[in-house]
Amino acid sequence: MDSVNRLIELLYDRLGQSVSLDEAASAAGGRGKLEKLWPLVAQRGHRVVFSPAGACLVLPTAMDARLIERDLDTRRVGRNVICFPQVDSTNDVAFDSASQAGADGLAVLAEWQRLGRGRLGRRWISPPGANVLLSVLLNDPSEALGHEALTIAAGLAVAEGIEDATNIPCRLKWPNDVLLEGRKVAGVLVELRRSRKGRCVVIGIGVNANAAPDSPDIQSPATCLAEHMGEPLDRTEIVRGLLRRLDGWVARVEAADLDALHTAWRDRCAMINQRIVVDSGGRQVTGRVLDISPLEGLILCDDHGHRQHLPAACSTVVGIRRGEIEGKPRPPQRREKR
Ligand code: BT5
């Protein structure tokens, strides 16, 4: 391992503490070399503060492929990691890499996206250097990775990965929202394209780690993990948690082993039995949620008593009618007289 990586790893392993300059010098190979390494650490995007006690990395640390890949031990997802200061969309970078050798499982991260996108033409907004903007490429020539199953597998992996790294419990809102105390903290966008090597899938994930978006374009309440913790968060451990969990769920989806996915999703989803309104391909459907299926999407009993299967790719929940019972409209509320 070269000396700059040794120094970054030493600083990172003592996050929140100072590393004495003697220790830093021995990782660098001498005091003289250490002085030349500080600019290289900065070039990798890391900020270091110096005090009489030594040197300390500033949180959030930069997204650093070496730190993410270190002992990750995944089968497929995240075998290679690349980090960019800025891109249009990490999903596009991942798709553009599909025909390169060894691209399957590639994880692309960026500090900022100029054109981050959500589903159905919506935008994903995230300030620079604060959050997780991640895309994972999966080459899928045998077409074993269904869109429906991957969308919910990715949402579940995000909730679990966040919990592994931070102990913050998150809930799921079908099809792709991860919620913290009822507010959106992460979103998932699964896209499919055909390349020269056949079908490929990109799973795009945005997690508000250190900053919630501040924009009039945000239509529903958003939050970030740091707000909940009351302090800045290390994104590297969150990314590693996500990649590990995603690796496990992608393997199950590929093997068509969907029972555990179904159960784990239902356990984190507060929508079962709720009366909701869904926009599905421009058509509004209102009814009670019966189930979330990894193959068929949302299963709803509509207000006319018909069973409806709504696919994730074109559906959005536009309203949750809390407190209503089994599809019956709530009696009109009496207005309080002033
Ligand atoms: C999503 O779409 O939630 C999918 C978001 C996927 C983003 C990742 S980032 C890495 C990768 N590269 C990309 O270009 N995209 C992926 P959707 O369900 O359509 O939600 C979008 C809506 O959420 C917007 O219309 C806003 O109202 C709101 N929104 C935008 N940015 C947000 C944020 N950072 N946090 C919470 N809500 C946000």
Image: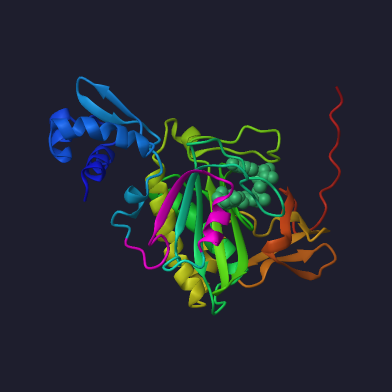
At x 52% / y 58%, what residue is drawn?
94
Instruction: Pick whichever, 109 or 292, lies toward us.
Output: 109
Provide residue 145's location: percent of width, then percent of height.
55, 72
Instruction: Pick whichever, 138 or 223, lies toward us.
Output: 138
The stretch drawn in magenta includes residue 75: yes
Provide residue 320's location: percent of width, then percent of height.
72, 50
Q: Does residue 270 appear anywhere in the picture?
A: yes
Left or right: 121 in relation to 76: right
Provide residue 56's location: percent of width, then percent of height.
27, 30
The stretch drawn in magenta includes residue 127: no
Quarter of the figure that contains the C terminus: top right
At x 38% / y 53%, what residue is drawn?
240
Instruction: Pick whichever, 127 or 232, lies toward us.
Output: 127
Colour convention of the picture? rainbow
Figure label count: 0
At x 29% / y 36%, what residue is drawn?
15
Q: Read off the magenta span.
A: 73-97
| Residue 269 location, quadrant | bottom right
Q: Residue furthest top?
A: 52
Provide residue 91's location: percent of width, then percent of height.
56, 55
